[in-house]
Image: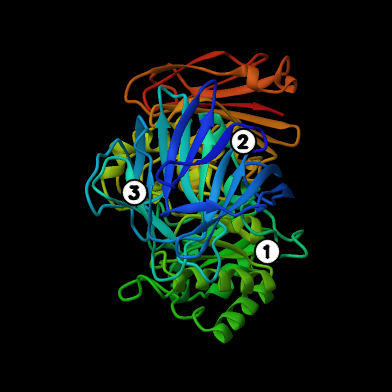
């Protein structure tokens, strides 16, 4: 039983492990079928978790769990931890979980970069593979279960779900012969799931003695508007100037900087940024995934001696961090390679942002220099295909309940103009994403002239935007429909909301969940203007509205400073 008594384990008649939740009545959520098991006498222990994060949805994280061990038929040991907001287990591989009691599910077809849409109630098809996290609803919004993985290390391969052809029954299988990490289910109300830090709670402690050099922040970013802009010194200079004018700490110099045009080099770009007081981050190809036909620089990080040399060069030249792209799935080779990259980068005081990669699995607690990971179908897809235009709003309103629950997500939000394919979300929707989507490094997608031409209040908002939060509260929403979130940074509070629908949406804000500091204060509310010839409506308020009407695919921000 969990320390708070809400989640229980029991051995079913068929000797499988049954997981239930007590919310007025007992409701069985999941059955874990590892074959016949029996509890090892005297194996129950109770533990407290208490730690601080450099970036994430909550700075001070606390939890409790009871751990119990079971003996399997093959003499392996199954360890299960029952937390106040979920469970985690490890010790078996190639087994089934039965979630057939769920009333709804949100599943993403697996790909090695986890860039896809979440499909609601997709149906069963034998052999289909789904990536973590997977969200399940029980009853009519009574209980939710988010299934993912945590505490994965250099000896593991990552796991995913395989459809058995039986509705709601899946095989959990690692991507190789190695054992998976701890399978982890966040359980409770929708707010319990969204606000949970369980993936990090159940992962190894921080391995760094000094984290004072790790500074989360906002970056200007070339790629969304200019596919190959990072090989053009003049374009890079414009994004540096934008970061300087908006007081952003970082600029990302993306792919192909090793082929700089205009008679300049990466040294010139780095020097220009540093002269302007902006710290550059630079891109590398991991050279284990997409290599042939892919952009460079390539093969600079694969061998330990080359990696040390490259990261030492970055450190010596004032580069703040690295974005490493194009990995090739969930195999042990990829997992171990990422661990090696994180440890080497930490030795040289470099921030790390992984792209084209698997999902977070608790590494941000173990390696605080990991400020974000992609593993999301994000705004860069406006640059690739037309599909995103019509689906983005609903997708955006699903991510806070799925992908972003488990760790920082580099979606690259906020664009007021268009890339190769148009967006039909409103400007207030786009601005709200900068708070709604948590990422230790937040890359602003749009062109410099777009941001710099916005009203003063919008520019000020972006200049002061935090990317690491003291606390997070879900104030309303449902996957794909709408979401309202509150985040705290010191004395500053932000409330943001987006509408995932193609029609106007009246939503309620659960103001009772907010602390008293939010009441009776002067706040600024930014939303879509009701006038067709205006973009923004910006006004001062002294009370958080309990009801907000959002435009189709619209949004809003309320800021208390």
- Is residue 169 placed above or below 561 in the rendered structure? below
Circle 2: is it few (<14), some (14-19), or many (20+) Cα within 10 Å?
some
Q: As drawn, is 424 to the left or to the right of 244?
A: left
Circle 1: is it few (<14), some (14-19), or many (20+) Cα within 10 Å?
few
Secondary element at tag 2: helix
Q: Residue at x 24, y 54 (%)?
A: 127
Q: From where the camera sits, is residue 436 visible?
A: no
Circle 3: is it few (<14), some (14-19), or many (20+) Cα within 10 Å?
many
Which label belongs to residue 248?
A: none
Q: Position of residue 459 (x, y in %)?
A: 59, 37
**Label 2 near label 1: C-beta < 8 Å?**
no
Q: Compare residues 340 and 382 and report the one nearer the observer.
A: 340
Which label belongs to residue 461?
A: 2
Given this view, does label 1 or label 3 mark the residue nearer the observer? 3
Spatial CA distance of label 2 from label 3 is 45 Å
Which label belongs to residue 170?
A: 3
Q: Residue at x 45, y 41 (%)?
A: 12
Spatial CA distance of label 1 from label 3 is 55 Å
Q: Position of residue 422 (x, y in %)?
A: 31, 41
Secondary element at tag 3: strand
The earlier-in-sequence mark between 1 and 3 is 3
């Amino acid at each position: 039983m969990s320390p708070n008594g809400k989640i229980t384990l029991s051995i079913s008649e068929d000797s499988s492990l049954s997981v239930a939740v007590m919310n007025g009545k007992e409701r069985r959520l999941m059955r874990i079928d590892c074959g016949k098991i029996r509890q090892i006498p005297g194996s129950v222990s109770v533990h407290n978790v208490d730690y601080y994060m450099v970036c994430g949805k909550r700075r001070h994280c606390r939890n409790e769990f009871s751990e119990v061990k079971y003996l399997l038929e093959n003499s392996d040991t199954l360890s299960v931890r029952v937390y106040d907001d979920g469970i985690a287990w490890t010790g078996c591989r190639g087994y089934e979980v039965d979630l057939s009691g769920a009333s709804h599910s949100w599943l993403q077809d697996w790909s090695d970069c986890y860039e896809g849409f979440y499909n609601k109630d997709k149906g069963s098809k034998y052999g289909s593979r789904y990536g973590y996290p997977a969200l399940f609803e029980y009853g009519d919004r009574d209980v939710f279960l988010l299934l993912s993985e945590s505490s994965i290390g250099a000896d593991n391969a990552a796991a995913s779900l395989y459809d058995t052809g039986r509705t709601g029954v899946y095989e959990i299988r690692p991507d190789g012969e190695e054992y998976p990490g701890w399978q982890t289910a966040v359980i409770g109300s929708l707010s319990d799931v969204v606000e949970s830090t369980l993936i990090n709670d159940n992962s190894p402690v921080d391995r760094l003695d000094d984290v004072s050099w790790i500074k989360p922040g906002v970056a200007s970013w070339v790629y969304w508007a200019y596919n190959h802009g990072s090989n053009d010194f003049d374009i890079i200079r414009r994004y540096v100037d934008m970061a300087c004018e908006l007081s952003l700490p970082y600029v990302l110099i993306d792919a192909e900087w090793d082929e700089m045009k205009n008679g300049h080099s990466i040294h010139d770009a780095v020097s220009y940024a540093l002269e302007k007081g902006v710290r550059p981050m630079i891109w590398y190809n991991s050279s284990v995934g997409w290599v042939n036909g892919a952009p460079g620089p390539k093969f600079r990080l694969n061998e330990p001696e080359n990696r040390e040399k490259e990261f030492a060069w970055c450190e010596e030249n004032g580069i703040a961090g690295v974005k490493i792209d194009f990995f090739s799935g969930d195999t042990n080779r990829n997992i171990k390679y990422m661990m090696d990259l994180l440890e080497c980068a930490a030795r040289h005081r470099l921030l790390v942002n992984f792209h084209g990669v698997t999902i977070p699995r608790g590494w941000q607690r173990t390696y605080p220099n990991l400020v974000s990971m992609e593993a999301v179908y994000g705004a860069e897809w406006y640059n690739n295909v037309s599909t995103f235009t019509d689906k983005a709003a609903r997708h955006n309103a699903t991510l806070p309940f799925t992908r972003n629950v488990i760790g920082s997500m580099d979606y690259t939000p906020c664009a007021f103009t268009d890339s190769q394919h148009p967006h039909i979300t409103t400007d207030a929707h786009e601005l709200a994403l900068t708070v709604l989507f948590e990422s230790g490094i937040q890359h602003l997608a749009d062109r410099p002239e777009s941001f710099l031409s916005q009203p003063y209040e919008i520019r000020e908002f972006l200049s002061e935007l935090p990317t690491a939060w003291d606390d997070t509260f879900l104030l309303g929403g449902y996957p794909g429909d709408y979401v309202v979130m509150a985040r705290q940074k010191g004395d500053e509070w932000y409330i943001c909301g987006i509408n995932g629908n193609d029609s106007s949406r009246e939503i309620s804000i659960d103001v009772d969940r907010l602390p008293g500091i939010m009441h009776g204060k002067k706040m600024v509310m930014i939303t879509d203007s009701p006038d067709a010839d205006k973009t923004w409506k910006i006004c001062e308020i002294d009370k958080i509205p309990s009801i907000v009407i959002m435009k189709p695919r619209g949004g809003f921000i309320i800021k208390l400073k």
